[in-house]
Image (cartoon, rainbow, N blue to C red):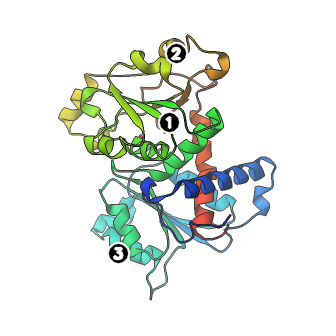
Amino acid sequence: MKNRLIGKDILRIEKLSKTEITQIWNQAAEYERLYKTDRLPLLQVMKGLVLATVFAQPSTRTRLSFESAMLRLGGQVISIADSQTSSLAKGESFLDTGRVVGGTADSAGLADVIVCRSAIPKSVDELARGSLAPVISGGQGTDQHPTQAILDGKTIIDERRRIQNLSFCFMGDLKNGRTVHSLLPLISKWPNNTVYLVSPEGLRMPKEILAKYRSQVRMIETSDVRKIIQNCDVLYCTRVQKEYMTKEEQRAAEREPYFVDMNLIEYANKQRAEKDRITILHPLPRVDELRIEPEKYKPLAIFRQAANGIWTRAAELALITGRV
Ligand code: NCD
């Protein structure tokens, strides 16, 4: 299959076609297979290339899985893991940071591909505008987190064998959670999906996002998870994004706590066969909202989901740098 992703930035899910997303999943599955049969170290497809991770916001999985992916494919990594140690703290713009790290038409860059995360709206877009090297968003404010949605999509296919004709429950902070803001456009590309949106009153999915995808995916808002959970194939739980809230908003969110425990899951599975039990996903980190452990419930897929971050990100790096 022709690689359509060469030189492309990955900033928003709407900018990727179904074919491109499927190509990432297929390549990811191939890397996963090679890893499991000890053949991945022989591949070295990223040899001679440098990845720069520019993270102006905390991260465990996203930064480390990109770096691990690059190293496993034989490439090398340079990193700003904390913006306080870089010139961003002196007030340097994301545009200039992009020009320096990713190079321009007449100045060599420090890296061949960049992953950037920031809390500031449009900052990753700005960095991408400056950089000649392709840029992947590792999460931009409350806006989007496209590579999380791509790894979520692979996990949904691994766990449910399809990504259409499914019912999802998105639960938690749907206002500020960028993972659900990317997962919604992704699943709305495939037919006959339904999404139940369950959140405290003050943390509902923004109206503009609902309006944008309403014609492609059936969406139903509710504050009572018990009303809908027996209809759902996949529960996607998220934490409250306190870092984006004023003290008053935090207090309001605390007045409407929500959580998922075995009680709710047993209720969800009441009428189902063992093989159809509800799949539970969470982008992690979880705080207090998901109170189930993988040893107790096999369809809790959160650690298989996190591991998929390595393979999908390896695929993204290799495809956009043209090494596939
Ligand atoms: C998410 C993020 O940064 O948006 N983390 C991640 O990359 N898995 C989710 C979160 O922080 O809640």
Give the labeled residue for mark 3: 96
Which sits in the foreground, 231 or 99? 231
Relative to the observer, which residue lies in front, 195 or 40?
A: 195
Q: Secondary structure at mark 2?
A: helix
The residue carrying pointer 2 sits among few (fewer than 14), some (14 to 19) or many (20 or more) residues within 10 Å by Cα, namely some
Residue 206 position (above or below residue 55): above
Q: CA distance from mark 1 to mark 2?
A: 29 Å
Q: CA distance from mark 3 to mark 1?
A: 44 Å
Residue located at (62% from left, 72% from top): 49
Q: Is residue 60 visible?
A: no
Ligand 1 falls in quadrant: top left
Q: What is the quadrant of the C terminus in the image? A: bottom right
286, above or below 269, in the image: below
At a point 43% along the width and 47% down the height, the residue shown is: 185
Camera sees residue 144: yes
Inspect the image, locate mark 2, and give the three-letter code of the amino acid beneath it: Met
Left or right: 250 as drawn, with respect to 304: left
Q: Residue furthest bottom?
A: 106
Residue 42, x across and y down, in percent = 79, 62
Secondary element under disc 1, as helix, strand or loop, is: loop
Disc on the earlier residue, 3 or 1: 3
Quadrant location of residue 220?
A: top left
Q: Position of residue 178 (x, y in %)?
A: 38, 45
Does residue 185 sit above or below 96 in this rendering? above
Q: Where is residue 53 drawn, in percent x and y?
A: 49, 62
Q: Badge 3 local density, few (<14 within 10 Å), some, or many (20+)?
A: some
Residue 262: numbered disc: 2
Residue 75 in the image: state x and y as whole percent.
65, 67
**Residue for badge 1:** 192
